Image (cartoon, rainbow, N blue to C red):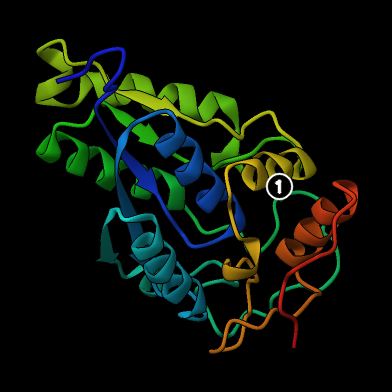
Amino acid sequence: MTTADHPGKAIVLFSGGLDSVTVLAMAQAQGYQCHAMSFDYGQRHSAELDAARRLARQAGVEHKVVRLDLDGIGGSALTDAALAVPEQAQEGIPITYVPARNTVFLALALGWAEVVGAQQIFIGVNAVDYSGYPDCRPEFVSAFEQLANLATRAGVQGQRFHIQAPLQHMSKADIIQAGLKLGVDYSQTVSCYQATAQGLACGDCDSCRLRAAGFAGAGLADPTRYR
């Protein structure tokens, strides 16, 4: 039951990276009973998933890992080994964009939300310091929330779903500072697109550059473990 003191359950999309770990900490700080959902979708490495499992245990939340075959579709340097991860900034939508990834992730989170009785779904998308992905924009989040309430039994019966994107209008530096206040240990997170099996970052990909710039902008030492 949702009350002012007990806001109820929430599904948190949880990759094990900097943003999603911050979002989980925010949701827990608001009092939500969180269920973390990660995806083994054919990405280049498992280090991020290993971090997600470890951090979910530390946070004391139920954690579900769903296997998807997005590598079978291809079209992204994150799922197709034949495509190189760029190590310089690109104009437009980069080759690391995974077609329909956040749409698919949110759809599965929505299904789990119906099963466990959660009305809140948290996602760590950002429209300030990000890579230009179309499924990170506020318009996408708003549109998916409308879909969620049209396409589900819970939605049509009046139990409205809300897609929470608390990082949406924050800079990477602001995200890091907010997470540190909530006790997030960023040295345990993995954000690199081509991390080693041990979780060591390349330092050159778009994700690594944004992360490093965030710590520099926050005036903090970068705790990322590099190769």
Residue, x 25% and y 38% (percent of image)? 110
Instruction: Tell me the quadrant of the picture where the C terminus can be found.
Output: bottom right
Q: Badge 1: few (under 14), some or many (20 or more) residues near its Cα, within 10 Å?
A: many
Q: Which of the two residues, 177 or 135, is positioned nearer the viewer here?
A: 177
Residue, x 45% and y 34% (percent of image)? 29
Can you give x and y, in whole percent of width and height, for residue 105 in the image? 36, 49
Can you give x and y, in whole percent of width and height, for residue 47 in the image? 50, 79
Residue 135 position by quadrant: top right
Instruction: Tell me the quadrant of the picture where the N terminus can be found.
Output: top left
Q: Which of the two residues, 168 or 5, is positioned nearer the viewer here?
A: 5
The residue under label 1 is: 176
Please name the amino acid that badge 1 sits on: Ile
Can you give x and y, in whole percent of width and height, for residue 56 in the image? 37, 60
Q: Is residue 190 above or below residue 153?
A: below
Number of marks drawn: 1
User: Is 12 positioned to the left or the right of 85 in the image?
Assistant: left
Q: Is residue 25 above or below residue 86?
A: above
Q: Is residue 104 above or below residue 63?
A: above
User: Is 152 positioned to the left or the right of 181 in the image?
Assistant: left
Residue 10 position by quadrant: top left
